[in-house]
Every structure is written in C-alpha cells, then in structure tokens.
Amino acid sequence: MLSFYQMVITLIIAALLIGPSTVSAEIYKYQSDDGVSYFTNAAVGGKDRPIVRETKSSTVKVGPKQYAALTKSFFHDIAEEKAREHNIDPELVKAVIKAESNWNPVAVSRKGARGLMQLMPSTAADLGVSNSFNPEENIDGGIRYLKYLLERFNGNLMLALAAYNAGPNLVDRIKSVPAIPETVSYVRRIIRDYSGRGHVVGAAMTAVKASNGDRIHKIVNKDGTILLTNTYAGKQEL
C-alpha cells in the first residue's frame, strides 16, 4: 500500500502528466487547524503559492525534476514523520539533511552520493532504497543508516556523524573523528545546527526511544558537544 507521501507525489506527477497541454498545472498545499495537510489544484486565497507549477506544453517526463519541484516544507514533513517512525530526533535528521544536500532532493556528489541524505548507491542497495531521488525512500533509508551508526558507536554522535561522512570502517579503526577537513567541518556544522535549535546548552537532554525500548537521552555539554546515552544520572556538569 502506498504511504501518504507516496500518494501525494504520485498525484502531483499525475497532475502534471494529464493536465491540459495549454493550461498550467498547479498543486497547492494547505494545512488545517488540526495539522492535516491537503493538496489541491485550486487556490483558496490570493496569497497562496503553488508547490508545483508546470506551464510547458510539452510532455512532462517523470523523474528527478518532479521531486525537485516539491517544496522544502514538504521534505520537512517527511523528515519529521520518518524520524518519529524510527524513534530518532527529527531535529538531528534535519541538521544532517541540511549538511548533506541543503534540502536538494536531486543532489549528486562528486563521489556519486544521491538525494536528500546523500546515499551512496551501494548503501542505498543495502538499505533497500530503489530510488534515491525519491524523498520518502531517501529519508527513510538515511534515517535507518544514521540510527545504525548511532547504535554501532554506542550513542557517540560525533563518531556516528563522522562515520556517515567518511565511512564507519575508518572511524571504527581510529576510534575518533578522522582528520579530514571535509569530515571535521561536516561534523561541526551538524553539531552547531543541532545544538542551536532550541536545545538548552549545559547538561540538557532530550529523550527519544532506542530500538530496544530504553530511553536515550541527549546531553548537550557546555562546550557544545553532544552525547546520546541510555544512562542519565540527572543534572551534572560535563
């Protein structure tokens, strides 16, 4: 069965494909007071802006361009839903996506990593991601990979992030963040963005659920470093 976001993406692409050739196809997103999102081809207010617009009379090809037409808020919704589904902090996921692709669903790195969370083809295959340009597939796979790395490195966020960027085998071997300028900068950017999003600095914690059911606490130290742990002894200076 298609998920909500898969159905929305399918409907958007279908609207672009079957719409009259001389009339622009526009899809608008609205959110009700109870938080439910609705998608329609009719604007309700004068200030409404479409999340997808296609005015060309030629046939629309289904592919990465259709994903690129979706808005950043749409990707945020997917990231938050998938993060909750996999019991990981949505703000961490968003910080990783920002560092990886800056919310570009069709980003391709020099090494061949693809999509919002920049999955390498081999990693995507291992995760069962068939289309890395599909926002929902990419984010779901990226979150599962990030969670695997957090578990592999016992909740050490800096090592998990370094492994996401430079590979887990290297980080496993040296037991620290590799002295690779790109990796060091990458880890710093995510830590900065993650710790700066409304989280209290200095023995603060945010609880999420680990895969085994234990509570995982996020402790932000005074120097800005972050530790994820399942043993939290209360407020303390770290």
Image: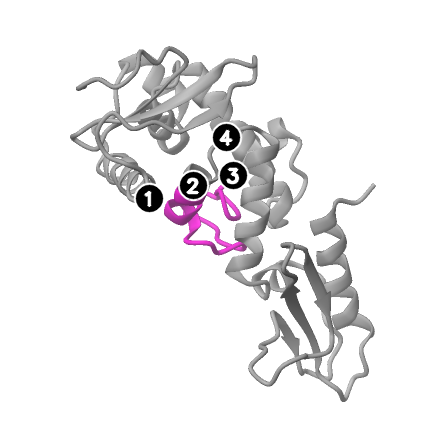
Which residue is denoted by mark 2 in the rendering? 91
Alpha carbons under labels 1 and 4: distance apart: 17 Å
N-terminal of the pair, mark 3 or mark 4, is: 4
Q: Nearer the viewer, mark 3 or mark 4?
A: 4
N-terminal of the pair, mark 1 or mark 4, is: 4
Q: Nearer the viewer, mark 2 or mark 1?
A: 1
Q: Nearer the viewer, mark 1 or mark 3?
A: 1
Residue 198's disc is 1
Question: Looking at numbered disc 1 in the image, what kind of residue is underneath it?
Answer: Gly
Residue 91 drawn at (x, y percent): 43, 41
Alpha carbons under labels 2 and 1: distance apart: 10 Å
Q: Does the magenta stretch include residue 77?
A: no
Alpha carbons under labels 2 and 4: distance apart: 9 Å
Residues shaded magenta: 94-119
Instruction: Look at 60% across and 69% down and name the residue there.
Output: 51
N-terminal of the pair, mark 2 or mark 1, is: 2
Which class describes the residues within 10 Å of circle 4: few (<14), some (14-19), or many (20+)? many
Contact? badges 2 and 1 (CB < 8 Å): yes
Q: Where 39 falls versus 217 (above or below)?
A: below
Question: Looking at numbered disc 2 in the image, what kind of residue is underneath it?
Answer: Glu
Question: Looking at numbered disc 3 in the image, what kind of residue is underneath it?
Answer: Leu
Residue 205 drawn at (x, y percent): 34, 27
Which class describes the residues within 10 Å of circle 2: few (<14), some (14-19), or many (20+)? many
Which residue is denoted by mark 4 in the rendering? 88
Query: Left or right of 179: which side holds 75?
Result: right
Alpha carbons under labels 1 and 3: distance apart: 28 Å
The quarter of the picture where residue 204 lies is: top left
Which residue is denoted by mark 3 in the rendering? 119
